[in-house]
Amino acid sequence: MAEQPYQAVLAVISEGPDGDGGSRPLGSVPARVHGWLARYEAGGPEGLADRSHRSASCPHQMAAEVEARCWSCAGCTGLGARQIVSGLGRRGVAPVP
């Protein structure tokens, strides 16, 4: 659990949503505090834990098999990107990166 979000949520709960926010930690933007409050209401103190900003998926990522073939082509013969793509196309790999 992150300390700043927790302190900000406790301040809003104790003062009420219309409080002056005097006890909120410095640097807390009201919109961010409202987001923390929603996360706290949905998941309790565990809802305030730091979350990853990493995407769940990458829609343009190539298949693992194609990636492995690219690495094997580049590592064995010292080819460049255009030569690897051309070679994969000749070998019937689809779609080529």
Image: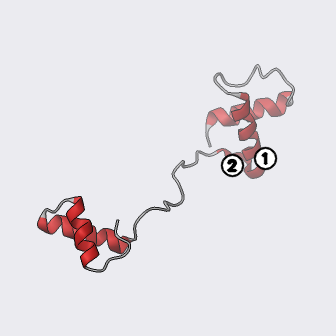
Q: Residue at x 75, y 36 (%)?
A: 34
Q: Nearer the viewer, residue 42 or 94?
A: 94
Amino acid carrying label 1: it is Glu
Characterize the local packing of mark 1: few (<14), some (14-19) or many (20 or more) Cα atoms within 10 angstroms.
few
Q: Specify the quadrant that holds the C terminus.
A: bottom left
* x and y, in percent, of residue 76 in the image: 14, 68
Q: Specify the quadrant that holds the N terminus.
A: top right
Q: Nearer the viewer, residue 85 or 5?
A: 85
Write down the quadrant of residue 61 in the picture. bottom left
* x and y, in percent, of residue 13 in the image: 82, 34
Q: Residue at x 76, y 51 (%)?
A: 42
Q: CA distance from mark 1 to mark 2?
A: 8 Å
Task: Of the two numbered discs 1 and 2 on the same chain, state the one appearing first in sequence.
Answer: 1
Q: What residue is shown with label 1?
A: 41
* x and y, in percent, of residue 94 in the image: 36, 76
Residue 71 visible, this angle: no
